[in-house]
Image (cartoon, helix red, strand yellow):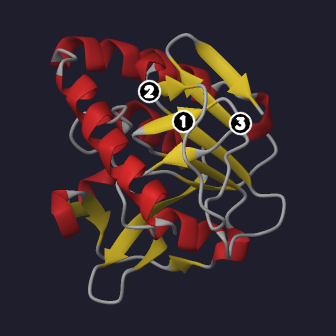
Amino acid sequence: MSFAIKKRKKELRAAYQAKLGLLPEEEIRRRSEVICALALALPVLQNKQVVAAYSSFRQEVVTRPLLTGLLTAGYVLALPVVDQTNRKMDFRRVDSLKTLTPGVYGILEPKSGRLCPPNAIELFFIPGLAFDRQGYRLGRGGGYYDRYLSTSKPGAVKIGLAFHLQLTEALPVDPHDIKVDAVITEQGIIEF
């Protein structure tokens, strides 16, 4: 990663976190409900069995309605578990949201349940601070998703969840950055 790209990504992270910080909690909830409804109605979801998602954190799209909907519909749901010491993330199967407990960074994680190998997951719902019109995402800087997705099943569908204000024309990109296939915002679905 070049110093210039690293510096620009850091600046953009701060800018998008500030933008998100201005969104009122009620607005975050309202927009998140629309995004989760769109996600649950995706045609590509219909022929999948194992779906990975995430527990929302801070001003991210609130995923609780999505997680509940996936479990109710009978999908095998996997959520991330972060091993900060080894800078590694795995996905663990979840049967009930009641069993989630705070993990690294205070994000709710499954502490028990079977690990889902990367080649078993057919569709990922992915967080990000920003997404561009080419499908690249700006994460929080740990590289967890890019490392994990580089080992995922070929053809696994990757869908970003974000508010419309998190979209931009172009983001700085490193060779290891993984693109998403689509982004869902409260204004609709953008496919790449």
Q: Mark 1 or mark 2: which comes first in sequence?
A: 1
Q: Tell me the distance, in whole angstroms, between the alpha carbons under discs 1 and 2.
A: 6 Å
Using residue 35 as the reference point, say whether residue 56 is left or right of it: left
Figure check: 17 above or below 144: above
In the image, 2 versus 78, the foreground residue is: 2
Question: Image quarter for residue 149?
Answer: bottom right
Q: Tell me the distance, in whole angstroms, between the alpha carbons under discs 2 and 3.
A: 14 Å
Residue bearing mark 2: 166
Around disc 1, counting alpha carbons within 10 Å, would you say few (fewer than 14), some (14 to 19), or many (20 or more)? many
Using residue 23 as the reference point, say whether residue 30 is left or right of it: right
Figure check: 35 above or below 192: above
At label 3, the amino acid type is Gln
At a point 34% along the width and 74% down the height, the residue shown is 82
In the image, 117 versus 142, the foreground residue is: 142
Question: Image quarter for residue 16?
Answer: top left
Q: SS class of the residue under badge 1?
A: strand
Residue bearing mark 3: 134
Can the viewer see residue 102? no
At label 1, the amino acid type is Phe
Q: SS class of the residue under badge 3?
A: loop
Can the viewer see residue 82? yes
Image x and y of residue 29, in percent: 28, 19
Figure check: 91 above or below 19: below
- The answer to whether marks 1 and 2 mark residues whose Cβ atoms lie closer than 8 Å is yes
Image x and y of residue 108, in percent: 25, 57
